[in-house]
Amino acid sequence: MQVMKFGGSSLATPDRFESVARQVREALESSAVAVVLSAPAGVTNQLVALCDDTQATDIQAITAPWQARYPALTDALAQWANQLEAWCQGIALLGHCPEGTRVAIASAGERLSVLVLSHILEADEPLQLDPAGLFLGYGPRLDALVDLDASRNKCRGLREKQPRLAVMAGFYAGHRDGGQCLLGRNGSDYSAAVLAACLDAEELIIWTDVDGVYQCDPRLVPEAQKLRQLSFSEALELSHFGAKVLHPKTLGPVGRFHIPTWIRSSLDPSLPGTRIDTQVEPSDKPVKALSSLNDVVMVSVSGPGLKGMVGMASRIFAAVGQAGVSVLLITQSSSEYSISFCLNAVDERRAVNSIEDAFSLELASGMLEPVSVQRDLAILTLIGDNMCQAKGVAGRCFTQLGRANINVVAIAQGSSERAISAVIPGDCAARGLKMVHQAFFDSSMPLELVLLGCGNVGSELLRQLESQGHWLAKQGINARVVALSNSQKMLVDTKGLSLAHWHQALEAEGRPLDLEALKALSQDLLNPVLVDCSASDELPAQYQAFLEAGFHVVTPNKKGNTGALAHYKALKKTAKQHRRRYLYDTTVGAGLPVIENLQNLLHAGDELQSFSGILSGSLSFLLGRLEDGVPFSQAVHEAMEKGFTEPDPRDDLSGLDVARKVLILSREAGLDLELADIKLTGLLPQSFASLSQDEFLARLPELDEAMAQKVSDAKAQGKVLRYVGRIENGEGQVGLQAVDANHPLHRVRDGENALAFLTRYYSPVPLLLRGYGAGADVTAAGIFADVLRTLNWMREV
């Protein structure tokens, strides 16, 4: 015997009923079949509404689709509708709906389904089973349980002489005190499980609108995979902590009698679904599934009256039980000073009132403190039979939550070690689920970029990301750009933007830039990285907020680290507090690993004694061209054309860009300096600073003669001009310097950078870094490297 249960979505239309009939006939070819039916989708809600407002539902509209498709059912459907109308008239006369009438009306949809399917399968002579006569319920009439042993006795004859085809309405049963009762949420699934147990069925198949049980809610974690199988114990834990497709009441009867149970999709019967059984194939993973139960509150009872007092815990939970409230999770402090437990939010008031009544004397005397309630919580649970004695499971979970800046309010673990639960803020539930799923089920490392600034460097970074896509995938890195923007517009797609024609898409589809909306993306992302490739003065002021929102920040924009010293320190502190990476290697030396190497030295206990270097690739190129006899104005234009300069070349020629780099290095070395403390001598007269960019470029030739003379004077002494930044004796300075052939910077030109660090470890020969320090390609490559460094924290999990 095979028991098949079909839910409301499988019975929503006449066509769906026909599809169900085909599935039943196919099953009849190999086995006897008992079919349990829910009401058609939406009908139960319409019927329940009648109990409180007899005009709320058009009864004839419910029967219309079936009458139109199956004219032979006209009389039976009319009788069904007339009975409903008679009950409604009784409600109107009484002024309220008696409990028995509510049960009858609420379960009428299931009887409608039996009526329709029995007609379609008429040729197969289905036996209609009456659940009120077969099942004996007890407890609240609107949420009853079934006495399984008594019901099996009632079904003995049916079990011994099983019909070829039986059809039964789900959701209701007979009550031991007479009349009928409802079986509560997922009542039809429960009915099917009870029938399977009563008939000693070979299997139960629950046909629904999903194709099985997933590792976690696929609506929250699209990467979640369907589970081929679950043990009954795993399924029970999963159902207890919020899996909508399962319910503990359903699993009880089939688990007791070891009846294999399937969750399958009636919309696509070809899919295998998920099998729940006593014995399952071994798995090498400790965690089988995750669940997230929302709308939870945590009630805490505390006070000196708890410590050492035998029976206090039992009194607390007796009071909760008397209120008809189910406890989801319990945790107690080792000091015995407090007991906390979680409930569904809808049960809070009843539970608290009952506790306050039961402990009124203790509360009045101060032996107990006022009952406290934490609201808006969620329970995230790891489930798996293999978790028993598996080391490091809890550690991986809580490490991942910690790295996501999610506070764990409480922890609980069953003695079977089959489930570990963490109570977390409700607004973090979705992100927490994604993060923990990534740690246990996804071997790839996510990298989700929000790119601000699509100029030369930003565009080159996008090109490199696209061209390196295959390599990234081979390394197990799932990199995608989820947002990009220029100064006015942005494109956003958390699934990943296409980089093939991003420029056209930004122009055609971009919406106004909204930094707050970009910050909010962190709730949907696992490893969000803000990359600021702009030259904006304003965006660095937002770095702290992005770090607090959960983003790593990678930037070549020097404004963030060269503003007020207090802001610089706040950025570093915020990154540390929120466990985010704040990376800015490309602010000095473009693609050269300057900052990282300096930080490594200092972290190892080294100390910077002095520094000197050529820090501007553009000025390195420009002064090299002056050596070749090229006029100053022409050299500037060449540097601009090659992308060596900042958008406004005066940032380079003024020396301000180099001064910012010297300030960054000074601060990294522990010097508390402001930008104004750097002694700066630029290449331009002060009068050029107030010109517009066009005016500045037009007047550049006025400087050709003076610059040529400086080059000539240096040459006469056997020297060349270099623009050098220095740090010495706690001070920073920047300016033009003539160096001879013996100087380490003499040969550094044509866009190269060179940096010499004299330290306690590297002395008397300094640590020397040399290479190209200008150009969009090397800068973008350095940014790319910084972006990849944000993955280090995930590799530790």
Image (tube, rainbow, N blue to C red):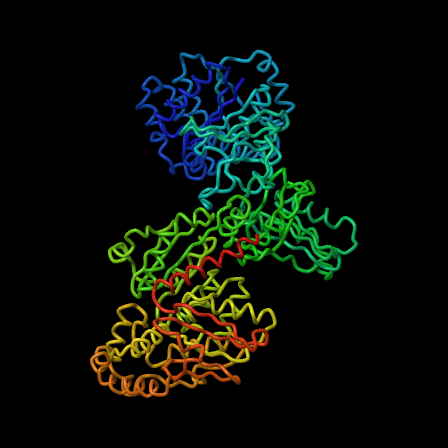
Picture layout, residue 767 above or below residue 129: below
Q: Position of residue 784 (x, y in %)?
A: 42, 59
State the residue in front, 794 or 135.
Answer: 794
Dividing the picture into quarters, in which one does residue 173 lie?
Answer: top right
Picture layout, residue 607 above or below residue 189: below
Residue 360 visible in the snapshot: yes
State the residue in front, 100 or 437.
Answer: 437
State the residue in front, 12 or 593.
Answer: 593
In the rendered structure, the answer to whether residue 757 lies left or right of residue 506 reads right
Picture layout, residue 703 above or below residue 387: below
Residue 179 visible in the snapshot: no
Q: How many marks?
A: 0
State the residue in front, 533 or 419.
Answer: 533
Q: Position of residue 358 (x, y in %)?
A: 69, 51
Q: Position of residue 258 (x, y in %)?
A: 62, 25
Residue that appears at 31% across and 79% down: 627
Dividing the picture into quarters, in which one does residue 236 lie?
Answer: top right
In the rendered structure, the answer to whether residue 35 lies left or right of residue 649 reads right
In the rendered structure, the answer to whether residue 159 lies left or right of residue 88 reads right
Q: Position of residue 554 (x, y in %)?
A: 44, 64
In the rendered structure, the answer to whether residue 354 lies left or right of residue 643 reads right
Residue that appears at 63% across and 37% down: 385
Q: Quadrant of the N terminus?
A: top right
